[in-house]
Structures are given as C-alpha cells and as structure tokens.
Amino acid sequence: MRVVVVSGGDPGHVVPAIALCLRFAEAGDTPILLTGDRWVGAARAEGITASTVAGLSLADLKDAPDLGLALCDQAAELATALAPRFAVLEPDLVVCDVLALGASMAAELVGVPWAQLSPHPLYEPSKWLPPMGSGLAAGTGVRGRLRDAVLRTLTARSLKQGERQRAVVRRRIGLGAQETGRIARLIATLPALEVPRPDWPRDAHVVGPLLWEASRDVLTPPPGDAPLVMVAPSTAWTGARGMAEMALEALEELRVRAVISTFEPSSDLPDWARSGPGKQDELLRQSAVLVCGGGHGMLVKGLRAAVPVVVVPGGGDQWEMACRVDRQGSGLIVRPSTVDGLRDAVARVLGDPAFAAAAARAAATVTDVRDPVEVCRTALTLAR
C-alpha cells in the first residue's frame, strides 16, 4: 500500500505523523511524508521518503481576525497545491493530520480515499458532553445536563459558522459542500485520556500514542540520588511562556535534580540542573515527576512511561488535557502559573504515591487500542 501522510510542522502533530510513517514502513507499506521543511531531514534520516509542503503552519495565522476563516482560506490554497502532487504520487491512501484540512480536500479532488490522524483525543462535539476546551466533566443529574446543554447552545453558532465557511471554500475549489471520501479516523491517544460518549463515531478508532524521538542525543541528568524532575516547556505557540525559568526557581528549595528538555542547551544553570536536547523516553525512565505545558504529545509520553505530571497549561486544548489528567488522578494543574503554585504541586506529587499509581493505570490502558495500519487496511478494503 502506498500512503501519503500530510502533517504541519508543529512538533505535536509532525511527531505522530513520523511515527505513523514508521509503522506503515514496518508493515511493508510505502509511506511518503509531506510536512514543514524543518522535519524533512529528520524523517529522511529514519528512512522515510519526505518532502516539503507549504501552507500548514498555524503560527502564520495567529494574528488573523477570524482564525476559522483564515484556516479555510489556507486549506483552499493547500488543496489546489497538493492535488497535482497527489496525482503524480498515485497513493492508495492519504492520511491527513486533523489540522491539514487542505490535504483532505486535495484527496477528494483527485478521488483518493483518505483517513484523518488526530494526535490527541477525539475532539468532535457530542450531544452528551460539554463543549471541548471547557475542561469540564460531563454533567450529572438534571442541573449538570442542563448546564452542558446551555454551553453547547452557546458554542453552536461558532460551529455552524465554521461549517458554512468550509462549504464556501469547498465550492470555490470545485468540491461539493459536504465532505466525502474519509474512510477512518485514527485517534492517537491513551484510552485513559478519552471521554466516554454514547455517540462515539463508527469510523473513529483509538490507536494509542504514536511516539517518536525527535532527538538522538543523550542528556545526562545531574549526579546524585535526589528525585529527578523533567521539565518540558510547551512547543505550541499557544503554550505558557517562561516555564523553564519559573520551574528552576520553584524547584530550587525542593532538593531535587532537574532536566529541562529543550531544542537548545543552556549553560547558565545551577549544578543540580541540566538542559538541552535529549531522548525524552530515556529521561522519563529516570524521572519521578514531569512538568509540562499540557500539550497532548508530551502528556501522553509521560503517562505512557507511568510518570505523574504537573501541568502548567497555556491556551488551545491544553486546558482540556490538563483537566482530564487531573480527573484521572495522575497529575495536578498549576493555574495561575506562579512559582509558589508550581513548587507546591511538585512537592505534593513527589510526596503522594497515589499520583504515580494513577499514572501507571493510565499507561496500562495502552493495551486496549487498535493497530493504525490494520485500521487503514481494513477501512480501505471496505471502501473499495
């Protein structure tokens, strides 16, 4: 099977895309990755055929007065640029990152089946849940259900507006108003982070975290036997800023060791801390606590390693993910983000084994997932 995988350059999206390409390759298929130029070399180093595609960066749109409309216009440009490339590549299947709306449109234009890759839990609205992003658990009882219904009504107008904007763009490039051609949705999360819903879509399949190490370097933690705290500042443009500096100030009084996982090393650190690029899975195996921004990629990597977390969420979906972790019991939220609040949260997680136990329970749910390659092959067979 020849598969084209399209993903933007944000690490939280391209890392699962690269991991999925490796899964396809291991299964004997031929994956081709189209992504931002920053990651093409890394993908090729893994043996993946990869090339650059423009028009996938959310950061380019952050100042747009209407982000939804800007996303639709960006999708139209991407679709018209990708359709000729798909025609040349002749894939059996296109897998589109959930934010690569234009890639799915391009697949429709050339008549190729496509699947959607969601590198996080299913965020589709549900008539049984509060709106996604609220961080709220599903309401119970009459009052709880009424609250959720009111919140869904308040967000319904924005959702309808988005549907109308997509329909306009689709007609502009020669497609019908309604989306066609999708054969499956790959939900790349831990089941522990999903929310039960009676209206779970039939084409959505939880395939577990798609993890890949972006660095081949090894970051050696400071010497000693004090607990190791790993700090992973958010890479998303919606993430909280200054987390590394705040974490160092917060941890100074706790008599711990710290590693700050970043793309660039820093030399101006106390002797109990290190920073720079390094294999995060190796660091997590040694860590007692993970401090992160609430992006799904880092959260699920920590929980997959059974490491409890302290979350300093920014905007976007980070609040939603932080609240799910908090309810599951494997971590704490720091909001507002203060030095004292972060210090207290880390101390509490270190001192209470219940957080590590909950993280281990979350990690164990990875056994209850489907193979993404098998999902795609089965769905493609049924679609033919």
Image (cartoon, grey):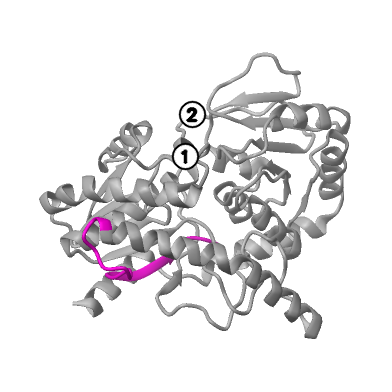
Q: Position of residue 29 (x, y in %)?
A: 22, 58
Q: Position of residue 229 (x, y in %)?
A: 73, 37
Residue 163 position (above or below residue 279): below
Residue 175 position (above or below residue 262): below
The image quadrant that residue 366 belongs to is: bottom right
Q: In this figure, which residue is indicated by the disc labeled 2?
A: 217
Residue 29 visible in the shown view: no
Is 78 situated left or right of 356 in this image? left
Residue 91 position (above or below residue 343): below
Is 84 situated left or right of 255 in this image? left
Query: What's under tag 1, amino acid-wise?
Result: Leu
Q: Is residue 182 magenta?
A: yes
Q: In this figure, which residue is indicated by the disc labeled 1?
A: 61
Magenta stretch: helix, strand or loop mostly: loop
| Quarter placement of the C terminus | bottom left
> Helix or strand or loop: what does disc 1 sit on?
helix
- Extreme-top residue of the structure: 268
Could you tell me which residue is drawn at 76 percent across and 32 percent down?
247
The image quadrant that residue 280 belongs to is: top right
Could you tell me which residue is drawn at 44 percent across and 45 percent down?
15
In the image, the segment drawn in magenta is: 172-190
In terms of depth relative to the viewer, which is nearer, 157 or 290?
Answer: 157
- Few, some or many residues within 10 Å of mark 2 (<14, 14–19, 20+): few
Give the number of callouts: 2
Could you tell me which residue is drawn at 43 percent across and 65 percent down?
163
Query: What's under tag 2, amino acid-wise?
Result: Asp
